[in-house]
Image: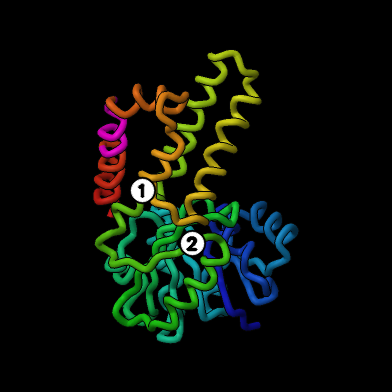
Amino acid sequence: MKYKIAFIGAGKMAEGILSVIPGKADVIMAEKSAARARDVKRRCGVAVTGDPALAAKSARMVFLAVRPQDVDEVAAVVKPVLGPSHVLVSIVAGKTLAKLRRAFGSKARLVRVMPNLALRANAGMCAICASANAKKTDVAAVGRILGGAGRTVVLAERHFDAVTALSGSGPAYFAYMAKAMADAGKALGLPADVALLLSEQTMYGTAKFLLESAMPLEPFIDGVCTKGGTTAAGMERLAPSAFHEIVAATLAAAAERSKELA
């Protein structure tokens, strides 16, 4: 049977992408864990197999969604079945187009994606780049699929270490900040569950407003910081601190690690 889309790997990120594909009957997933394969088949209603070569051979667009350390093992069995009509879409962290080309050969049209965990909430951020032999229609097709799970941007691959540091690793940093605010709220006497709700919803609502309004960040900050008010009192402690330097150093460390992994 022929399928439109195959996934090699059925982890949480793959499942996030799968959730926005309307035609589940057009999808086959290859997963080496039999228990995970059964679970995905039961919940998502897709065809599953333990053979990545069979999945790749059965479809024209193949999402590579495995751990970086598993890429070479997968490539050994998938490379022989890939042809010029295949679009191989990698969401594997740290694997450049050049490394993917060496592993999977020169026939398939390559598209590389740097997603983030928010895909699982249909609010992801995905950066996309493509090999020289990929078509504009390939990139557009990948963008349409991933756009259903959030937002996308097409960038040159040289930017991917920075993308990895900012949006790829960013969810952990945002969650860390949310926890710090919730802990501070608890220290001020709020119940722990209420402090966490206030922190998370405030972060979510602010991001939603900024994205939908396209309001620049500095005027937004100034608008909330009424002179002599409570926010201004807090900013008087935050603004002179090393906060910006800490954030910059955090992203620089993540970007450097991304370079090392590549």
Direction front: furthest residue: 227
Disc with the residue nearer the chain's start (2 vs 1): 2
- The location of residue 97, given as percent across then percent down, is 31, 67
Residue receiving disc 1:
166
**What amino acid is labelled 1 in the image?**
Leu
Q: Quadrant of the C terminus?
A: bottom left
* Structural distance between the alpha carbons of marks 2 and 1: 15 Å
**What amino acid is labelled 2 in the image?**
Arg
* Residue 151 marker: 2
Q: Quadrant of the N terminus?
A: bottom right
233 versus 210 height, above or below: above
Q: Is residue 127 left or right of residue 149?
A: left
Residues shaded magenta: 241-248
For label 1, count other residues whose C-alpha is less than 10 Å away and answer few (under 14), some (14-19) or many (20+): many
13 versus 24 height, above or below: above
Q: What colour scheme does the image use?
A: rainbow
- The location of residue 148, given as percent across then percent down, is 57, 66
* Residue 86 marker: none
- Secondary structure of the magenta portion, mostly? helix
Please report contact status of discs 2 and 1: CB closer than 8 Å, yes or no. no
Q: Residue at x 54, y 50 (%)?
A: 208
Q: Residue at x 54, y 70 (%)?
A: 145
Identify which residue, 139 or 85, lies in the foreground: 139
Q: Is residue 258 left or right of residue 9?
A: left
Identify which residue, 197 or 112, lies in the foreground: 197
- The location of residue 242, given as percent across then percent down, is 27, 27
254 versus 178 height, above or below: below
